[in-house]
Amino acid sequence: MRASRLLHILLLLQNRGRLTSAALAAELEVAQRTVLRDVEALAEAGLPMIVHQGHRGGIELGFNYRTRLTGLAADEAEAFGVLMSQPLTTLESLGMGDAARRARGKLLESLPDLVRERAATAARRFRFASRPEPRDEEPRLPALVTAIRESRIVRIRAHRPDEQVVHPIGLVCRVDGWCLDDDLTPGGCIALADCGDINISARRFVPRADGLAPPGGR
């Protein structure tokens, strides 16, 4: 947690210039004394932290210091990828669609390789075929997201005569609701409304995209 906060401080100072400890504390939702301890730790690590005293004082980075966005945690990189993949409907209506796509591409390319790959994988897994309409919250989504991330075998319509084993590899948000990509039926998408109760197995499968045939069984 502290490492993430230290990186956040660096990014804030890099992007906004000089900030007071109070402003940093408000942004990070911590006490001012925590910010001051973090700044001291960054200085001890050799970073050019400059602290100005007085009414117009504040904290800033010296020597035109710059850092790349290398500190995203795995779940942050995943969320970033999904955010970047959402439809640009609103921007298109403003005539900014092309500019937004160029900006998005440049931003993704500026990420380090590992972070960029995590973001790209999340963008493939969790897609929006259209701008989602407001609807009731889907309680099965968190469990299915975990199953997709961990390549776990899932049974849909569990404990019913028409129970079906699926290998979930993605979720798609459509106008008519969420649907599930099944690796066992390429090109198909199973509407979540038709899935009934789901059961997530402890067993895993190997996605076809990995170059191996997925194992069968329950």
Image: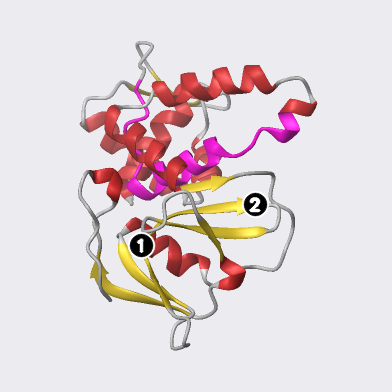
Outermost residue, top side: 63
Tally the numbered discs: 2
Is 49 left, or right, of 44 in this rendering? Answer: right
Name the foreground residue: 100 vs 43: 100
Residue at 20% over, 49% down = 212
Badge 1 amino acid:
His
Asked whether the beta carbons under mark 2 and mark 1 sit within 8 Å of each other, the answer is no
Residue at 56% over, 17% down = 102
Q: Residues within 10 Å of mark 2 (few under 14, many from 20)?
A: some
Name the foreground residue: 149 vs 61: 149
Q: Residues within 10 Å of mark 1 (few under 14, many from 20)?
A: many
Badge 2 amino acid:
Arg
Q: Main secondary structure of the magenta part?
A: helix
Q: By what rule are the colours in the image chosen?
A: secondary structure
Is 122 left, or right, of 128 in this rendering? Answer: left
Q: Label 1: which residue?
A: 167
Pick whichever of labels 2 and 1 is earlier in the sequence: 1
Q: Is residue 139 visible?
A: no
Specify whether residue 85 is painted magenta: yes
Q: Label 2: which residue?
A: 174
> What secondary structure is found at the residue carrying circle 2?
strand
- What x and y, as percent, mark residue 137? 64, 68
Name the foreground residue: 60 vs 170: 170
Image quadrant where residue 96 sits? top right
The C terminus lies in quadrant: bottom left
> What secondary structure is found at the residue carrying circle 1?
loop
- What x and y, as percent, mark residue 13? 46, 26
Q: Which residue range is magenta in the image?
A: 67-91
Residue at 65% over, 18% down = 98
Is 119 left, or right, of 196 in this rendering? Answer: left
Residue 179: which numbered mark, if any? none
Q: Is residue 95 visible?
A: yes
